[in-house]
Image: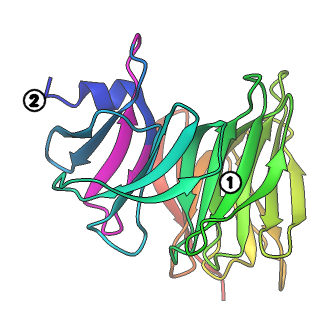
């Protein structure tokens, strides 16, 4: 149904915002459908199909007119580009990938593309990074029984952060330097991970462990958080240094902001 957003709301497989925040690209995978549908959703508008087949998609971080997506068929993994208007797609790369691509995330400068893939046995994940110019792939991590749930790039474009869980639900949050190919840290959650965000200078990470905010300082002085008697979830570090988060009490939930104490 083109006069409804039900498909995108219920069956979104991957989602990526446009650089200006007015549209999002998604792959929709309803029950019983083999190939995900590539679709565009505008704020205040309905879902618009852009193509019949896309395993994962992501908006170019440097252009509102460039959408990139991956197709996989007959052992070939292809990277395509299209526009929000749905103009004819153009193939820009053939990738040496046989695993099923689940998610693709660009660095803020559009120079590196992180690919999250499912291993051949259906268990575990492989996380790789592609150079945008040479299209060469570098494997960052491979897990056999663990699941990587989400990935993000730091603002300085050097580090990749991802959430990893085992079959018992134990979760760790990892950060890796993709240039030097080394792990920076692995944080074990005591309860459950409910969102994370890097500071604008990429020196510190704020995350919610079971509704309590914590900060891990990678570089510089340690940051102290005030004691808050509420459940704090989904923190987001704003560019001006403040931290936006969801504050939940028995009375309900509200958006709240932590400001720097100078």
Report the residue marked by disc 2.
3
Image coordinates for residue 73, horizontal then vertical, percent: 49, 32
Image coordinates for residue 253, horizontal then vertical, percent: 47, 41
Q: Nearer the viewer, residue 11 or 228?
A: 11
Q: Residue at x 75, y 37 (%)?
A: 125
Q: Residue at x 16, y 28 (%)?
A: 4
Question: Can residue 64 be spotted in the picture?
Answer: yes
Magenta span has 21? yes
For label 2, the SS is loop
The residues tagged by marks 1 and 2 sit, at their Cα atoms, a distance apart of 43 Å
Specify the quadrant of the image occupied by residue 100.
top right
Vertical position of residue 216 compared to residue 118: above or below: below
Q: Nearer the viewer, residue 230 or 41?
A: 41
Q: Quadrant of the C terminus?
A: bottom right
Q: Nearer the viewer, residue 168 or 189?
A: 168
Classify mark 1: residues with Cα within 10 Å, few (<14), some (14-19) or many (20+): few
Specify the quadrant of the image occupied by residue 203.
bottom right
Which of labels 1 and 2 is toward the front?
A: 2
CB under 8 Å between callouts 1 and 2? no
For label 1, the SS is loop
Of mark 1 and mark 2, the one earlier in the sequence is 2
Vertical position of residue 237 compared to residue 76: above or below: below
The dot on residue 228 is 1
Direction top: furthest residue:
32
- Span shown in magenta: 15-32
Image coordinates for residue 242, horizontal then vertical, percent: 55, 74
Q: Nearer the viewer, residue 182 or 3?
A: 182
Is residue 253 left or right of 25 when viewed as pictured?
right
Question: Can residue 248 be spotted in the picture?
Answer: no
User: What color scheme is it?
Assistant: rainbow
Specify the quadrant of the image occupied by residue 157.
bottom right
Q: Residue at x 28, y 40 (%)?
A: 39
């Amino acid at each position: 149904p083109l006069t409804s957003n039900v498909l995108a709301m219920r069956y979104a497989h991957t989602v990526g915002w446009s650089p200006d925040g007015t549209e999002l690209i998604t792959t929709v995978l309803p029950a019983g459908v083999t190939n995900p549908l590539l679709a565009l959703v505008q704020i205040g508008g309905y879902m618009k199909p852009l193509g019949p087949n896309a395993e994962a998609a992501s908006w170019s971080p440097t252009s509102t007119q460039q959408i990139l997506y991956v197709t996989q068929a007959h052992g070939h993994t292809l990277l395509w580009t299209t526009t929000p208007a749905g103009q004819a797609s153009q193939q820009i790369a053939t990738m040496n990938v046989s695993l099923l691509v689940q998610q693709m995330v660009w660095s803020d400068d559009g120079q590196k593309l992180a690919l999250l893939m499912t291993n051949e046995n259906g268990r575990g994940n492989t996380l790789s990074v592609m150079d945008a110019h040479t299209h060469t792939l570098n494997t960052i991590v491979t897990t056999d029984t663990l699941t990587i749930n989400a990935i993000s790039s730091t603002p300085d474009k050097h580090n990749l952060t991802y959430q990893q869980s085992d079959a018992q639900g134990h979760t760790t949050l990892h950060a890796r330097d993709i240039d030097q190919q080394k792990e920076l840290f692995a944080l074990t959650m005591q309860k459950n991970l409910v969102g994370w965000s890097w500071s604008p200078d990429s020196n510190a990470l704020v995350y919610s462990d079971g509704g309590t905010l914590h900060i891990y300082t990678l570089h510089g002085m340690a940051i102290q958080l005030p004691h808050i008697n509420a459940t704090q979830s989904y923190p987001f570090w704003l560019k001006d240094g403040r931290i936006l988060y969801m504050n939940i009490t028995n009375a309900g939930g509200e958006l709240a902001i932590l400001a720097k104490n100078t």
